Amino acid sequence: MNSNELIENYFSKNISKQELLEFNHLYKTNPEFKEEVDFLKAIKSVSEVEDDVEFKKQLTSYESEYAHKEKSIISKWLKPLTAVAALLIIALSINFLINSSINEDKLFATYFEPSKNVSSPIVRSETDKTALNNAFITYNEMNYEQAIPLFDNAYNNTKNSELLFYEGNSLLVLGKIEEAIEIFKEHLTYNDALTNRTHWYLALAYVKTKQLEKAKVELKALINSEETFKKTEASSLLEKLE
């Protein structure tokens, strides 16, 4: 039996014990035979052919298509090119899977940075030790854990709704996402200078918690507002979520 028949019977699982012995002997002693078998195994693996009949048709197709070519030419050019094509298919498939799946944590880390204090000037003096001033001093020093109760206390005393914005930012920094969401939602019930900016941070909180449809709603609210803050970033993030 010639080598082509042995290979065909091997891949179609229609090989006898005697033929299998001959196949194994050739595989171990004939480098060219081994190279061809390994090549066909690679094709079968990449294309994930599970139907032996279909694979046999492929073998027949390959033989028919390249029957007029010298075997040395096929070995020299066809196999390397097909191997390269197989690698390209694998690479493209991996790239597609990576790009088609949304990594919420990565998106959050890419887009989130806590807001700067744009509400209240900091006064560092012995005379001004109000809860509001202390809250912003602590926030500017990035001591977010301490800033949260200070903002909460100052808000309860003054009812200054902008303080909710900074409290929500502090919670986001510390990874207290659910608490941040509730604070931002409360802030959206007010109409102050920072209300539209809260849409951005609430959207990021929703991304972090994988609530992507809600995130889209908040991003669109920011984009459609007159607020210029983070509008470009909001459009970019929305495009990634669509």
Image (cartoon, grey):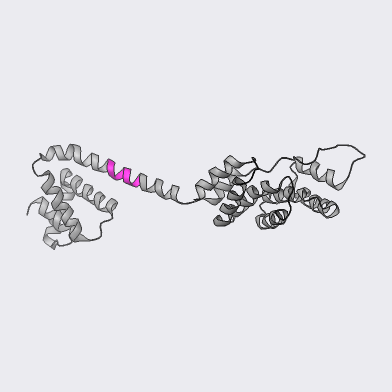
Q: Give the magenta part as a residue range.
A: 84-90
Q: Is residue 62 left or right of residue 229?
A: left
Q: Residue at x 74, y 53 (%)?
A: 190
Name the residue nearer the viewer: 229 or 77. 229
Q: Return the x and y of residue 136 as percentages of the image width and height.
A: 79, 43
On the question of residue 210 being in view, the answer is no
Name the residue nearer the viewer: 217 or 21. 217
Q: Is residue 157 left or right of residue 163?
A: right
Q: Residue at x 7, y 51 (%)?
A: 2
On the question of residue 19 being in view, the answer is yes
Q: Return the x and y of residue 125 as percentages of the image width and height.
A: 89, 37
Name the residue nearer the viewer: 75 or 179. 179
Q: Is residue 69 above or below residue 150?
A: above
Name the residue nearer the viewer: 46 or 224. 224
Q: Is residue 50 above or below residue 30?
A: below
Examine the residues drawn in magenta and state their main secondary structure.
Answer: helix
Magenta highlight on residue 89: yes
Q: Is residue 64 left or right of residue 108?
A: left
Magenta highlight on residue 32: no
Which quadrant: the N terminus? Answer: bottom left
Q: Return the x and y of residue 83 as percentages of the image width and height.
A: 26, 43
The answer to which quarter of the image holds residue 231 is top right
* Identity of the residue furthest to the left in this view: 1
* Identity of the residue furthest to the right in this view: 127
Q: Return the x and y of residue 228 as percentages of the image width and height.
A: 64, 40
